Image: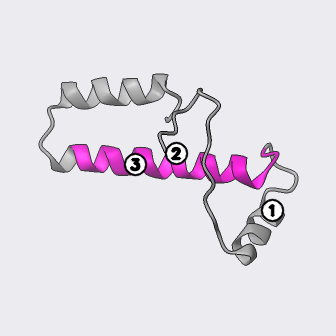
């Protein structure tokens, strides 16, 4: 399934119930309104870091890195 931010389309990802409960407890009193919102935030951060690391290892120029990071920022991933 092609899931893009801003399209209102989502997919389901399963996590262990014990992890769900830990996250639910962890986000109490924070700005996160749901476990899904928190998990989405964390995954965006991890994916962005991995993409940046991949770019560094592929010999991308500094200018190309800046352009890609700016694109990711405009898309809301950073």
Write down the residue under mark 2: 44
Write down the residue under mark 1: 24
Write down the residue under mark 3: 49
The local crowd at label 3, few if under 14, some if 14 to 19, many if 20 or more residues have their Cα within 10 Å, is: some
Residue 22: % across, % down: 76, 71
Cα–Cα span, label 2 and label 1: 19 Å
Cα–Cα span, label 3 and label 1: 24 Å
Which residue occupies the foreground of this view, 15 or 21?
15
For residue 34, which numbered disc appears in the image?
none
The magenta segment is 32-55
The local crowd at label 1, few if under 14, some if 14 to 19, many if 20 or more residues have their Cα within 10 Å, is: some
Question: Do the numbered discs 2 and 1 sit on residues whose CB atoms are within 8 Å?
Answer: no
Which SS type dominates the magenta stretch? helix
Dot 1: what SS?
A: helix
Q: Residue at x 14, y 32 (%)?
A: 61
Residue 25: % across, % down: 83, 65
Residue 9: % across, % down: 61, 36
Q: Residue at x 21, y 27 (%)?
A: 64
Residue 70: % across, % down: 38, 24
**Residue 54 position (above or below residue 2):** below
Cα–Cα span, label 2 and label 3: 9 Å
């Amino acid at each position: 399934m092609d899931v893009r931010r801003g399209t209102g389309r989502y997919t389901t990802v399963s996590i262990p119930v014990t992890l769900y409960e830990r996250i639910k407890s962890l986000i109490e009193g924070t700005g996160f309104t749901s476990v899904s919102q928190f998990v989405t935030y964390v995954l965006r951060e991890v994916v962005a870091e991995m993409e940046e690391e991949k770019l560094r290892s592929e010999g991308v120029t500094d200018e190309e890195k800046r352009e890609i990071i700016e694109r990711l920022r405009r898309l809301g991933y950073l």
